[in-house]
Amino acid sequence: MRSGSAKWSSTISEVGGVRKVGIFGGTFDPIHQGHLVIAEQVADTLGLGIVIFVPGGVPPHKPPTSVKASAEDRFSMVEVAVADNERFCVDRVEIDAGRPMYSVETVPLVKERYEGDEWYFITGADEVSNLLSWKEPDSLLAQAAMVAATRPGYDISNLDHLAEALENYEKIVPVECTRVDVSATRIRRMLAEGKSVRHLVPDGVFEIIHDRGLYGADEAREDRRSEKRLSGSTEA
Ligand code: ATP
């Protein structure tokens, strides 16, 4: 069975013999526990057999300088983060394209590479609210249902603006997830301030960040240590 012949519903779980596939695109700069929690809980709620993480090269809607780690470093972090979850995998399609890609272009390429009957494009609530600013949102929805995973600080109870504008609005599937109040922006900021992000990211990601000196983490930590030493000697 190909996508389109299956029933779409926010409540379906496993339907016998149907391969349900999730595609999870993002900058993952870096990947963090918020991403992993929604991927796992969406997969569990919708009965997805596999979630394919697709780290982006340079996202078309962001200036190139807004992405801090290289595509290869971000890919390595996703690879290590998903390694111990048998349902998760990572794909290089956007990174290898070496150019900005819109989700409406990425989804068909991913669909060619994996077996699947029902396709779900996973996003956080913030992204779904902005769907009208995406390239060809109706075509994207025609190719894959869009999961709106709840995210702290964003409200998906009112998506009326989408209902009015999109023919395929019914293919948006809200999924209630445990709220993990973390963002890659906050993690990068903490690292730049020399703070620990241990446990906000998986251990393997934490190690890559420090081994490769990403996000200015180690310089900032060193500065912070020196400041502490200095303030200690003043007090003595
Ligand atoms: P940044 O802070 O750099 O914008 P981010 O933390 O939002 O990054 P992205 O890689 O841009 O991470 O996000 C990929 C997808 O994951 C997006 O659809 C986003 O909405 C979702 N997402 C990210 N963090 C969370 C979270 N804590 N809870 C729910 N969804 C999230």
Image: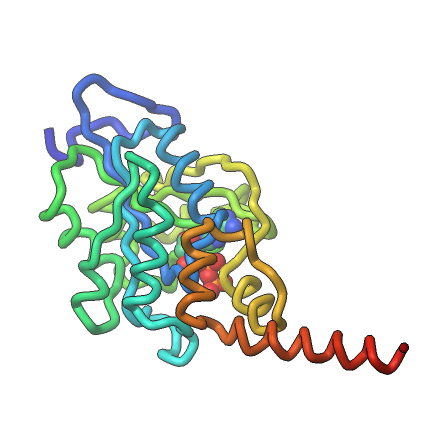
The structure residue drawn at horizontal position 25% and vertical position 20%, both measured from the top left corner, is 15
Number of marks present in the image shown: 0
Q: Do we see residue 127 in this rendering?
A: no
Residue 223 quadrant: bottom right
Locate residue 99 relative to residue 134 in the image: left or right: left
- Residue drawn where x is 67% and y is 75% of the image: 224
Which quarter of the image is occupied by the N terminus? top left
Rendered image quadrant of residue 172: top left
Q: Residue at x 41, y 46 (%)?
A: 163
x and y percent of residue 119 in the render?
A: 23, 39
Question: Relative to the observer, which residue lies in front, 55 or 110?
Answer: 55
Q: Is residue 167 above or below residue 93?
A: above
- Which residue occupies the foreground of this view, 145 or 42? 42
| Residue positioned most to the top | 16
User: Against 137, is 22 above or below?
Assistant: above
On-image quarter of the C terminus: bottom right
Identify the residue shown where x is 38% and y is 78%: 63
Image coordinates of residue 48 in percent, x first then y, are 29, 32
Residue 155 vs 211, above or below: the answer is above
Q: How is the image coloured?
A: rainbow
> Residue 218 at what x, y percent from top left?
53, 73
Looking at the image, residue 206 sits to the left or right of residue 84; the answer is right
Q: Position of residue 125 (x, y in %)?
A: 48, 49
Q: Is residue 181 visible?
A: yes
